[in-house]
Amino acid sequence: MKNRFLSNILLTFIWVAITGDFAFLNYVFGFILSFIILYVITKGRGDAKYFKIIPKLIAFIFFFLWELLKANLQVAYDVVTPKFYMTPGIVRVPLEAETNLEITLLANLITLTPGTLSIDVSDDRKVLYVHAMYLSDKQAFIDDIKNGFEKRLLEILR
């Protein structure tokens, strides 16, 4: 997988050098073009994990940006209106993530989203404690994290 990624990056830079256009969109186009070329060339050979992870990674980035936008708007609305809509609480989120990397990335993604803060991980690393500013339904909050951040993150890392 590492070799395919490096090949993809190298082909992207070759594309940019040949075209002479150093705009961001040309890098994106070159990356997509080289991804397709590598897919066609290596189809049916060996491990195709790289070709499954990259689309999931791109989808995850857009998912995270959408969640970030929603959380920012919710917090901003609460700040500019005279009434507070906060219902803070601390929730125990059971974890499917097992490794230190998986747990750390999940906790950081939750903390980066406004209105939520990862507080602690249990000693057996099976529960993540999260503080939420807007907690109307604990189970819905847990399901959002499990089916959103954690599920998508584990699809990429495993």
Image: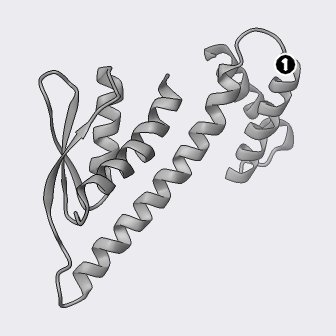
Q: Position of residue 154 (x, y in %)?
A: 46, 30
Question: Element under label 1?
Answer: loop
Name the residue type under label 1.
Lys
**Depicted 112 relative to depicted 133: above or below:** above
**Depicted 73 relative to depicted 109: above or below:** below
Q: Nearer the viewer, residue 154 or 112?
A: 154
**Depicted 123 relative to depicted 113: above or below:** above
The quarter holding residue 107 reads top left
**Depicted 32 relative to depicted 111: above or below:** above
Left or right, 3 with reference to 129: right
Q: Position of residue 36 (x, y in %)?
A: 82, 33
In the rendered image, the residue lying farthest to the bottom is 82
What is the basis of the colouring in this image? one colour
The quarter holding residue 83 reads bottom left
Task: Tell me the residue at 14%/29% (across/down).
Answer: 122
Task: Tell me the residue at 59%/46% (across/down).
Answer: 59
Image quadrant in which the N terminus is located: top right
Q: Position of residue 31 (x, y in %)?
A: 73, 37
Q: Position of residue 97 (x, y in %)?
A: 34, 27
Left or right, 126 with reference to 158: left
Q: Nearer the viewer, residue 54 or 138?
A: 138
Q: Nearer the viewer, residue 97 or 136?
A: 136
The residue that label 1 is drawn on is 43
Task: Tell me the residue at 37%/73% (across/down).
Answer: 73
The quarter holding residue 88 reads bottom left
